[in-house]
Image (spheres, rainbow, N blue to C red):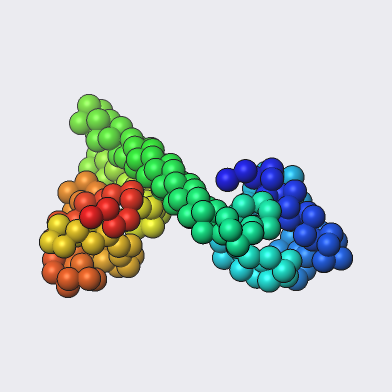
Amino acid sequence: MDQAKIGKFISECRKKAGLTQAQLAERLNITDRAVSKWETGKSLPDSSIMLELCAVLGISVNDLLSGEVVTMDNYNKELEKNLLEMVKQKEEADKRLLRVEIVMGVIAVLPLVAAAIIVAVVPMEEWKAGLLVGLCLLPLLIATPFALKIEQKAGYYECQKCGHTHVPEYASVFFAMHSGRTRYMRCPKCNRRSWQKKVISRDRK
């Protein structure tokens, strides 16, 4: 999607509706800075407010994502193009999040590894060794819930029984037995348990 084109289109529609950036922002309960970033092509409206934005501007979501009013002749073609682009952008964002999860895990584990080496090499009282390991364990304990949240939200899990892909509840991911990013969970479609792999694309089968 052409962010610059979409931004210019939002600006034109806003002015046509007789609204300032501040007035549009107030209608959407956001900051006028966010509206300014849209109109300058620096960012796109969040999906959670796209419908409300389109209602205020008197356009369709397809118009918004196309950066122009789509004629009926081109409607289906532009809709398919925009949907594919949104799927592509989500997959790229999910890949970035999963890379962040790996970096977060490595950074959280390093202090614990360092503490284990220090305890093994440097003579010290047991309570001091325990305290050192405990303190170095804290980053891992803090990072784990955030890493699991990323793993839950980014991409999908694929059922090995029926091939269905889904985003599980956080509790399911948290309590499931796992090996890397493969988790033993129940499929919401076939209701059977299996070792489900993390995948980026939805419903590939």
Kindly identify the residue that appears in the image at 13 percent across and 66 percent down.
Answer: 193
Q: Is residue 30 above or below residue 191?
A: above
Query: Measured from the top left, where is residue 77 in percent x and y?
Result: 51, 54
User: Outermost residue, top direction?
Assistant: 121
Which quadrant of the rendered structure holds the N terminus? Answer: top right
| Left or right of 168, for residue 36 | right
Q: Nearer the viewer, residue 153 or 69?
A: 69
User: Outermost residue, front direction?
Assistant: 73
Query: Measured from the top left, where is residue 41 in percent x and y?
Result: 69, 44
Query: Measured from the top left, where is residue 152 in percent x and y?
Result: 34, 58
Q: Nearer the viewer, residue 182 or 86?
A: 86
Quarter of the figure with residue 57: bottom right
Which quadrant of the rendered structure holds the C terminus? Answer: bottom left
Query: Measured from the top left, where is residue 69 in percent x and y?
Result: 68, 58
Kindly identify the residue that appears in the image at 44 percent across and 46 percent down.
Answer: 88
Q: Nearer the viewer, residue 111 or 39?
A: 39
Q: Nearer the viewer, residue 33 or 144?
A: 33
| Left or right of 60, for residue 162 | left
Kindly identify the residue that appears in the image at 29 percent across and 57 percent down.
Answer: 203
